[in-house]
Image (cartoon, rainbow, N blue to C red):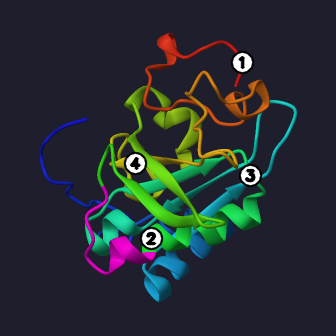
Amino acid sequence: MTDEPFQCRCVLCHDYGDRDEADRMDLTIIQHVQQHGWHVVMVPEDEIGPGFAQTIGLAHTHGRPELAMSGLDVHATHRMLNTPGEKSAAGEALTDGQSHPDVVDGHQVALSQVDRGWFRTFFGRAIGFYLRPLLPVLQASWPDPEDRFHWDEQADVGHRESQPQLWLPPSDHPVGI
């Protein structure tokens, strides 16, 4: 990532003459960002990995990083991402290394800067919206009932495998999720 401020070149800021080529999902994202300030994309769990959700529009509307969360029901994750999304929209800076309480059933989430090596794999819709491969994204990681995160060795194997470690470059990521 770069230390330069995020410069929005998204499909809402500029008419690139290709809006008639936008698919239904792109038009829904545009509409939600215009109406609510952001949209949450939900990708259900499948044989490849856990479900995940991500925001699109926080950087456009509020100049804040986008958020991503995985390993829980995508509809619940959608609601959960709205909590830090609303904090961000209200002007609270969300940054790498922060924890935020009361996001997951009274538990905190930990925010980590996503390594750009994951962008094309996980954030294709956001790249399409912003028309650029580099954008600020924070992973919101959730703890187990004992408040242990998936990188903690004390967490059980199921929890450790419930979420990717997107702050690691893909080449350094553990095998599995």
Residue 109 included in the magenta stretch of the image: no
Q: In this view, does 26 lie above or below 126?
A: below
**Nearest-to-viewer mark from 1 and 4:** 1
Neighbours of disc 3 within 10 Å: few (<14), some (14-19), many (20+): some
Q: What residue type is labelled 3?
A: Leu
Task: Point out residue 25 in the picture as x, y percentages from the top left corner.
Answer: 65, 66
Q: What residue type is labelled 1?
A: Gly
Q: Earlier in the sequence, mark 4 or mark 2?
A: 2
Task: Point out residue 174 in the picture as x, y percentages from the top left corner.
Answer: 60, 14
Residue, disc 1 = 176
Q: Which of marks 1 and 3 is nearer the N terminus?
A: 3
Residue, disc 3 = 72
Residue, disc 4 = 137
Neighbours of disc 2 within 10 Å: few (<14), some (14-19), many (20+): many
Is the C terminus in the top left, top right, bottom left or bottom right quadrant? top right
Distance Cα–Cα, label 1 vs label 2: 29 Å
Residue, disc 2 = 85
Q: Earlier in the sequence, mark 3 or mark 2?
A: 3
Q: Left of 107 or right of it: where is 7?
A: left
Distance Cα–Cα, label 4 vs label 2: 12 Å
Is the N terminus in the top left, top right, bottom left or bottom right quadrant? top left
Q: Which of marks 3 and 4 is nearer the N terminus?
A: 3
Distance Cα–Cα, label 3 vs label 2: 18 Å
Q: Residue furthest left?
A: 4
Q: Identify the element where label 1 is drawn.
A: loop
Report the number of discs.
4
Task: Point out residue 76 in the picture as x, y percentages from the top left corner.
Answer: 72, 66
Q: Identify the element where label 2 is drawn.
A: helix
Q: What residue type is labelled 2?
A: Gly
Distance Cα–Cα, label 3 vs label 4: 19 Å
